[in-house]
Image (cartoon, grey):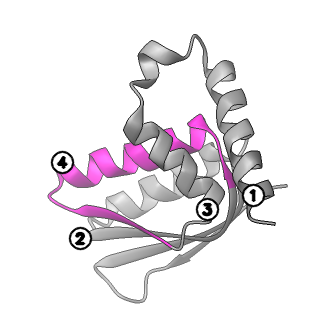
């Protein structure tokens, strides 16, 4: 599955990304490119609407955190809304664990995140 990115810039200086599908190693560069384009316009906030985002890997997290770092440096904000439970679980894990000391590789991290998201989806059925 691919990544769907819809950008709503109608509420300048706020930029809203609606994401759908999978945000992973293959699709994260596409989002990073869009983020860079938006950053050039110097928005006050970037909103990531994740209502249709089904999966996020460490590459997807890096894209979001990179946007957050850039916005923070520009005194702006990154806001996230409508997270699916599986995606929310990934963000909860990142907040709770010192990732660098837990996982030996990106592949190992992605395997763990994949397992956690699958578990949350199964519990939701």
- What's the distance in space between the residues labelled 1 and 3, CA to CA? 10 Å
Identify the element where label 1 is drawn. Answer: helix
Identify the element where label 4 is drawn. Answer: helix
Q: Position of residue 62 (x, y in %)?
A: 48, 39
Q: Position of residue 58 (x, y in %)?
A: 58, 35
Q: Position of residue 8 (x, y in %)?
A: 50, 81
| Front disc: 1 or 2 | 1
- Image: magenta residue range: 55-81
- Horizontally, residue 1 falls left or right of residue 38, namely right
Quadrant showing the N terminus = bottom right
Q: Which residue is mark 1?
A: 123
Pick whichever, 123 or 109, lies toward us.
123
Mark 1 or mark 3: whose residue is earlier in sequence: 3
The residue carrying pointer 2 sits among few (fewer than 14), some (14 to 19) or many (20 or more) residues within 10 Å by Cα, namely some
Are circles 1 and 4 on residues that touch, CB within 8 Å? no
- What's the distance in space between the residues labelled 3 and 2, CA to CA? 27 Å
Q: Which residue of the protein is positioned furthest toward the left in this rendering?
A: 75
Q: Which residue is mark 4?
A: 73
Identify the element where label 3 is drawn. Answer: helix
- What's the distance in space between the residues labelled 1 and 4, CA to CA? 39 Å
Q: Which residue is mark 2?
A: 44
Q: Residue at x 81, y 66 (%)?
A: 125
Above or below for 73 versus 7: above
């Amino acid at each position: 599955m691919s990544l769907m990115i819809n950008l709503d810039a109608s509420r300048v200086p706020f930029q809203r990304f609606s994401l759908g599908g999978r945000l992973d190693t293959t699709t994260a560069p596409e989002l990073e490119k869009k983020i860079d384009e938006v950053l050039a316009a110097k928005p006050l906030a970037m909103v990531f609407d994740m209502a249709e985002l089904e999966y996020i890997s460490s590459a997807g997290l890096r894209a979001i955190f990179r946007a957050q770092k850039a916005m923070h440096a520009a005194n702006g904000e990154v806001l996230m809304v409508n997270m699916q439970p599986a995606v929310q679980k990934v963000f909860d894990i990142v907040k709770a664990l010192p990732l660098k000391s837990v996982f030996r590789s990106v592949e190992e991290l992605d395997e763990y995140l994949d397992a956690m998201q699958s578990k949350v989806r199964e519990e939701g059925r």
